[in-house]
Image (cartoon, rainbow, N blue to C red):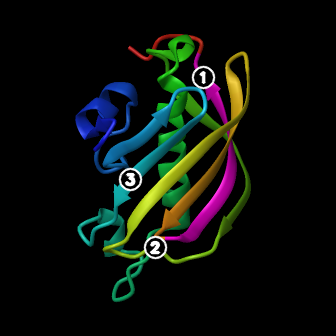
Amino acid sequence: MSVLEASEIMQLIPNRYPILFMDRVDELNPGESIVVTKNVTINESFFQGHFPGNPVMPGVLIIEALAQAASILILKSEKFAGKTAYLGAIKDAKFRKIVRPGDVLKLHVQMVKQRSNMGTVSCQAMVGDKAACTTDLTFIVSPTDSK
């Protein structure tokens, strides 16, 4: 059972197709952690060019998916409701498994620290029991409402 479906996700973050990289939020512990599902399908527009005959999800888009999951974790807190979260830094990104059409990407994000309108999260993108990508992300929340 999902905590948030796609329509509810779009109420929180400004991303839309073709740059919305999550299907549902499976678990959410505000201020602590989130688990999100991204079903990777052959219909994704990036597979047309990356790579013909050998479709591979670009690593930068896996990072973007993790950043979107982190945004939901951040923006579900009362302090940042109605704001926009931006990616400030990517640290120690490692890609360990190729992500292909048919894979189910589970995005795990854990809050590490938060100060004022900035913070750090630890992230893992998993396919089954294998880590496809691990990284730490820094976020910055806009001081004004996103509307």
Q: Which residue is mark 3?
A: 37
Cα separation between marks 3 and 2: 14 Å
Q: Residue at x 38, y 26 (%)?
A: 12
Vertical side of 115 occupied by 45: above or below:
below
> The magenta stretch spans which residues?
129-142
Q: What type is the residue that disc 3 sits on? A: Thr
Q: What type is the residue that disc 1 sits on? A: Val
Q: Which residue is mark 1?
A: 141
Is residue 86 left or right of 20 when viewed as pictured? right
Badge 2, how many Cα within 10 Å: few under 14, some, many 20+? many
Q: Residue at x 65, y 60 (%)?
A: 134
Question: Does the stretch in magenta take in 87?
Answer: no
**14 or 34, which is in the foreground?**
34
Give the quadrant of the C terminus: top left
Cα separation between marks 1 and 3: 23 Å
- Label 2 sits on a secondary structure element that is loop
Question: Does the stretch in magenta take in 135?
Answer: yes
- Label 3 sits on a secondary structure element that is strand
Vertical side of 45 occupied by 140: above or below:
above
Mark 1 and mark 3 in contact? Answer it, CB < 8 Å. Answer: no
Q: Residue at x 28, y 44 (%)?
A: 1
Give percent across and percent down for residue 24. 32, 45
Give percent across and percent down for residue 13. 40, 30
Q: Counting residues from the N terminus, which is met first, the one under dot 3 or under dot 2?
A: 3
Vertical side of 20 occupied by 33: above or below:
above
Q: Counting residues from the N terminus, which is met first, the one under dot 2 or under dot 1?
A: 2
**50 or 140, which is in the foreground?**
140
Give percent across and percent down for residue 102. 31, 74
Q: Which mark is residue 99?
A: 2
